[in-house]
């Protein structure tokens, strides 16, 4: 079974996204409310996520910074990361694409197709 | 011997005296020079300060733009965040993924869901429109095929159409190699999808929406025809304005944002094209027309920076009269860069004095300029002598009566008052460089050239009669029998005057005028409307471009049109001769 880590500072968004992925794809979900917590959760060898869905704007360490920090840790650098952002302007999109993440998804997402969007971005066939 | 020394002494005294006077004179002259230099320095300092002020004003404006940018970006982000939770929660509940919901509650969930979707679309559309109209979303032009784009739009909308029981049909009369044009494909696709979505929304079930592509060497014409309820005549233009729907309940019933057509218009204008709506002939429903040039051209309306300045270089001495020194400086600089020589006047009185001086025989012999004034750019609202009074005076003085005048005013050219008839050109403030250059170029061409007239008339026999009557006039006259031919002719080389029949096989005179109005070099074109019916006042207002005359086919014989046109051309060239 797939295990997905969701990192977002908004409690409600974490809950809705988790529910949506559990209900539509049956994935196992772990959540974290900030970048530092996210890195800790991803480092747990018992529950290593197959993919990380991460918010961009977070207090403290933002999404791009967290991503760069993850790349420094060989244990978690290989986990694909998808950014989930409410910023839709071209400049932001180009900046995110330049980071080396596996994809960028936009808020507000459709709860019924979020899992399909993730699978498509990562090339998961199941 | 006593005489000699005294003479010498006397001479010495005189010389000394003369020297003294000379020294004093020289001293006073150098004082004068000093004063003059000081004044010059002061003036220089003032003009430097003025330039600095203008620079800081510009910097402030770009700062403001940045603040606005930042604001829109932040607001859209802040609105999206709570909407993400709402949309997610409602979506999961109404899909029944978390257990069944009571039917009444289900209905409420559906209402909440659809309105959330609408709010999201609205935020996206506002952001989109704002970015386009501020010119911050430049077009990424590349060669694309209109047919492929239309096919893609049709494919995208097929699911929605199927759901509504509507068939979409795509036809093209255009040869394959003539459907390529320069455009931002994503943006054009956005327009086509939007037009199709509207057509589907307003068409009854089991009907057909059709997309038709036509082309010629210069332009592409695309039509989206729906058999829907149609748009009332008085709303055909308004539907392209923001939040203007035919019925106020449409946004909630049809789920639109009221911004779709405004976005379409913005995109098409940015491409230098035109978009307009027309009721279908002999049936219900509406046809949306999109006209695009095949070679890349951006228009001034949406993005002032993008328009290519007219290639030709100007020539002649132009008098710029405006009480605002800032405007004078800017206009003078723009015109100088395009080869014009400039005289500036800060008031109507000054303008008249300069015009007299530089148009009198022998003008230029006093060493200040080498030629008479070619045209005057005149501000309307000035303290003291207004633009109106100045214009009137200029026309009264024989030496200045025939100098072409271009009015600069906040009033749009379509609302130009009757007493502006003796002005040859009109540019609405705030204007951009290219608009001004195009209008000035046109006015100067009319003054000098032999005159080029375009006759737009679908009736061949009638056209032949009119063309024949012009043979002796020495003017070049071209004929266009369709809306599209007229558009092509105008794109090929702008005429100096248009004779327009209102009924055309592929549109009508109103659409042509609407299109002309969007073209920088053609929006103030002199026009003679030669129509078979009596015009109402609102119709006349819609048709008025530059100086406009209305002729009734029953009252004015085809052979007499020439007379009216010649008189009009004469008046435009030399207002005093006719007035």
Image (tube, rainbow, N blue to C red):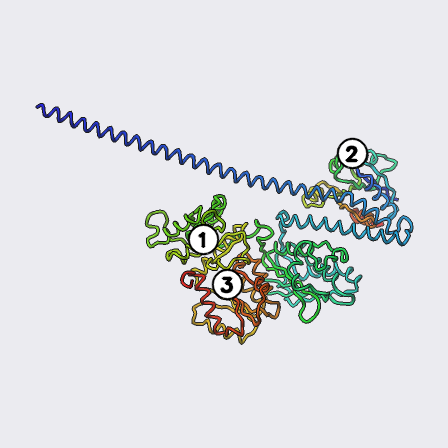
Task: Pinpoint residue B130: horizontal percent, then vertical percent.
Answer: 66, 48
- C-alpha span from label 2 to label 1: 80 Å
Q: Nearer the viewer, residue B423 or B534?
A: B534
Instruction: Tell me the residue at 41%/55% (across/down).
Output: B394
Q: Does the image show residue B31?
A: yes
Q: Examine the rendered structure and indicate whether residue B149 appears above or below residue A79.
A: below
Left or right of residue A58, residue B429 in this image:
left
Q: Secondary structure at mark 3?
A: loop
**Could you tell me if the residues under marks 3 and 2 are in contact, i.e. CB atoms within 8 Å?**
no
On the image, numbered disc 2 is attached to which residue? A73
Crowding at mark 3 (Cα within 10 Å: few <14, some 14-19, many 20+)? many
On the image, which quarter does residue A30 sit in?
Answer: top right
Quadrant of res B207: bottom right
Could you say which is closer to the camera, residue A31 or residue B8? B8
Q: Chain of mark 3?
A: B
Decide: few, some or many residues near mark 1? Use Cα within 10 Å; few <14, some 14-19, many ≥20: some
Q: Disc 1 versus disc 3: distance between alpha carbons?
A: 31 Å
Residue B448 visible in this rendered orientation of the protein: no
> Residue beneath label 1, please?
B389
Q: Is residue B298 above or below residue B169?
A: above
Q: Is residue B573 left or right of residue B480?
A: left
Name the one closer to the observer, B55 or A19.
B55
The chain letter for the residue carrying disc 1 is B
**Position of the N terminus of chain B by quadrant:** top left
Residue A65 position in % (x across, y down): 74, 35
- Does label 3 lie on the same chain as label 1? yes
Residue at the disc numbered 3: B495
* Residue B249 percent across, percent down from the top left: 75, 57
Residue at the spot 50% in from the left edge and 60% down from the top edge: B418
Tell me the chain of label 2. Answer: A
């Amino acid at each position: 079974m797939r295990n997905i880590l969701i990192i977002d500072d908004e409690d409600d968004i974490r809950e809705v996204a988790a529910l949506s992925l559990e209900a539509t794809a049956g994935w196992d979900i772990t959540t974290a409310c900030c970048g530092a917590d996210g890195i800790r959760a991803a480092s747990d060898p018992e529950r290593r996520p197959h993919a990380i869905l991460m918010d961009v704007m977070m207090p403290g360490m933002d999404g791009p910074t967290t991503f760069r920090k993850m790349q420094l840790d060989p244990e978690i650098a290989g986990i694909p990361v998808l950014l989930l952002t409410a910023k839709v302007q071209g400049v932001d999109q180009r900046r995110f694409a330049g980071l080396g993440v596996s994809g960028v998804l936009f808020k507000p997402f459709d709860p019924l197709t979020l899992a399909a969007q993730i699978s498509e971005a990562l090339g998961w066939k199941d | 011997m006593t005489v000699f020394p005294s003479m010498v002494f006397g001479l010495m005294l005189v010389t000394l005296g003369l020297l003294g006077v000379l020294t004093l004179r020289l001293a006073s002259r150098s004082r004068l020079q000093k004063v003059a230099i000081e004044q010059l320095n002061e003036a220089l300092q003032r003009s430097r300060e003025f330039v600095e002020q203008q620079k800081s004003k510009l910097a402030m404006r770009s700062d403001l733009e940045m603040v606005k940018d930042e604001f829109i970006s932040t607001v859209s982000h802040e609105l999206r965040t709570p909407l993400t939770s709402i949309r997610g929660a409602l979506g999961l509940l109404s899909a029944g993924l978390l257990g069944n919901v009571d039917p009444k509650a289900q209905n409420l969930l559906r209402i909440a869901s659809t309105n959330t979707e609408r709010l999201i679309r609205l935020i996206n559309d506002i952001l989109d429109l704002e970015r386009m109209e501020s010119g911050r979303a430049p077009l990424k032009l590349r060669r694309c095929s209109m047919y492929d784009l239309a096919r893609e739009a049709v494919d995208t909308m097929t699911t929605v159409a199927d759901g509504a029981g509507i068939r979409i049909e795509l036809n093209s009369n255009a040869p394959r190699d003539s459907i390529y044009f320069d455009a931002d494909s994503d943006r054009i696709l956005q327009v086509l999808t939007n037009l199709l979505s509207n057509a589907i929304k307003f068409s009854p079930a089991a009907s057909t929406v059709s997309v038709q592509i036509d082309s010629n060497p210069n332009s592409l014409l695309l039509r989206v025809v729906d058999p829907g309820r149609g748009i009332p005549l008085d709303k055909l233009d308004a539907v392209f304005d923001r939040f203007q729907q035919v019925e106020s309940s449409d946004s909630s019933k049809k789920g639109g944002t009221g911004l779709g057509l405004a976005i379409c218009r913005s995109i098409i204008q940015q491409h230098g094209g035109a978009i307009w709506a027309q009721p279908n002939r002999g049936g219900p429903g509406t046809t949306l027309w999109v006209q695009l040039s095949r070679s890349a051209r951006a228009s001034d309306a949406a993005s002032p920076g993008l328009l290519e300045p007219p290639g030709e270089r100007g020539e002649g001495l132009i008098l710029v009269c405006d009480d605002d020194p800032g405007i004078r400086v800017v206009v003078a600089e723009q015109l100088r860069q395009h080869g014009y020589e400039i005289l500036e006047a800060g008031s109507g009185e000054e303008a008249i004095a300069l015009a007299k001086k530089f148009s009198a025989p022998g003008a230029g012999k006093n060493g200040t300029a080498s030629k008479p004034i070619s045209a005057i750019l005149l501000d309307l609202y000035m303290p003291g002598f207004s633009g109106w009074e100045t214009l009137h005076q200029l026309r009264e003085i024989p030496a200045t009566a025939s100098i072409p005048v271009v009015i600069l005013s906040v009033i749009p050219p379509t609302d130009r008052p009757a007493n502006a008839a003796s002005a040859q050109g009109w540019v609405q403030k705030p204007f951009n460089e290219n608009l001004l250059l195009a209008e000035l170029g046109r006015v100067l061409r009319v003054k000098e050239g032999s005159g080029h007239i375009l006759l737009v008339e679908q009736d061949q026999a009638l056209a032949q009669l009119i063309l024949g009557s012009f043979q002796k006039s020495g003017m070049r006259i071209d004929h266009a029998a369709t809306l599209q031919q007229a558009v092509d002719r105008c794109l090929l080389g702008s005429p100096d005057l248009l004779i327009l029949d209102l009924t055309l096989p592929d549109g009508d005179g109103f659409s042509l005028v609407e299109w002309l109005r969007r073209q920088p070099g053609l929006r103030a074109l002199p026009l003679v409307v030669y129509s078979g019916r009596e015009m109402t006042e609102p119709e006349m207002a819609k048709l008025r471009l530059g100086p406009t005359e209305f002729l009734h086919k029953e009252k004015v014989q085809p052979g007499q049109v020439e007379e009216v046109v010649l008189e009009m051309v004469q008046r435009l060239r030399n207002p005093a001769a006719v007035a």
